Amino acid sequence: MPVVEVNKLSKSYGDLRAVAEISFNVEEGEIFGMLGPNGAGKSTTVEIMEGVRQADSGLVRVAGLDPQKDRNSLRQIIGIQLQSSSLFPKLNVDEHLKAYGSFYTHTRKLDDVVDLVGLTERRRGRAGELSGGQQQRLAIALALINDPQIVFLDEPTTGLDPQARRRLWEIITELRNGGTTVILTTHYMEEAEALCDRLIVMDHGSIIESGTPSSLINKHFSESAIGFSLKDGALIDADAIQSSQYVTEIRNVGSTIEVFAANVPGAISDVLGLAGGGKETIEDIHVRKASLEDVFLKLTGRTIRD
Ligand code: ADP
């Protein structure tokens, strides 16, 4: 049984079609990712599911409820992550949780919520004195105070350092393992790849791909990426590399050149041959599997930050 059903959902702002007849389901107990560049229509879709925004047409059911008609009942069973900028700097962690808990008929035990987000030691800490990662975790704790069936997390790790980000990934995984359905929008492909059970990729208001991260990677890439950089002042003929029978694509990523190929030894041999044996020209040669970021770039023609 899907816990969220979206069927032919559309929404325009004036002449702008922000969401164009999209359909998808979210299954109970999964981490469902919504990816797409800025302006793709993710927030509009999420806000309609949350009952914050009204659809123009289409059917949306969240835990069997109509987000417009059953807004009050829906609010009791979903969790919406606030931006950490909407915390009250002078209130401490416990005070925040008690204040937000008072909006709900059913709440989770405070001890459990602070434990889940790893803030037990900081319960008396004022929001304004918490680190960025701790503030984000408090924002997530507030979304969990009503013990929701479904939690909406909007870019939960934006601006966090890698360690704080990984800490949040653990929390999100723990939530899912406890049976909560998580709907996550993110800009970070690595995050989507690590966390999401299934995802949709949106662009210009439409869904352009959907599936598990590994199914999307396998569908779009049988190739691996061979990366290398050029020694100072060295040049390499990109057209000649592209013309190798093994090379499907060549790409510049910062100071690294990436060559996509299914036959890795064949492509490396061609690249080294073109680089005059390689020693004078090439350094740091390495091979990696294709990632969700590669899929995104292939599908949308741009990186997610563009
Ligand atoms: P995303 O979350 O993927 O960045 P949004 O749903 O925020 O996408 O936006 C989709 C499109 O709708 C964008 O072109 C955006 O500028 C436009 N848009 C979003 N909200 C409004 C609004 N309240 N009024 C007018 N246009 C809007």
Image: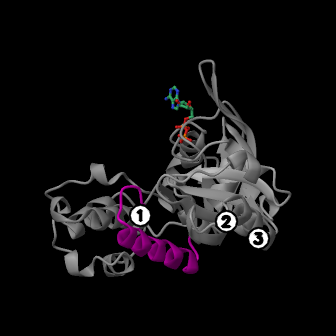
Q: Nearer the viewer, mark 1 or mark 3?
A: 3
Q: Which residues are magenta?
A: 157-180
Residue 30 versus residue 67 in the image, above or below: below
Relative placement, left or right, of 271 versus 167 is: right
User: What label sits on residue 49 in the rendered view?
Assistant: none
Label 2 vs 1, first from the N-terminus: 1
Residue at 76% across / 46% down in the picture? Answer: 23
Answer whether residue 268 is magenta in the image.
no
Amino acid type, mark 2:
Ile
- Label 2 element class: strand
User: What label sits on residue 264 in the rendered view?
Assistant: 3
- Pointer 2: what residue? 226
Residue 51 versus residue 155 in the image, above or below: above
Location of residue 143 in the rendering, given as x and y in whole percent from the top left corner? 41, 62
Separation of residues labelled 2 and 3 (CA atoms): 7 Å
Residue at 21% across / 75% down in the picture? Answer: 123
- Pointer 1: what residue? 105
Residues marked 2 and 3 touching at CB (< 8 Å): yes
Would the CB of label 3 be found within 8 Å of ligand 1? no
Relative placement, left or right, of 11 versus 173 is: right
Which SS does the magenta portion mostly show? Answer: helix
Amino acid type, mark 1:
Thr
Relative placement, left or right, of 218 versus 197 is: right
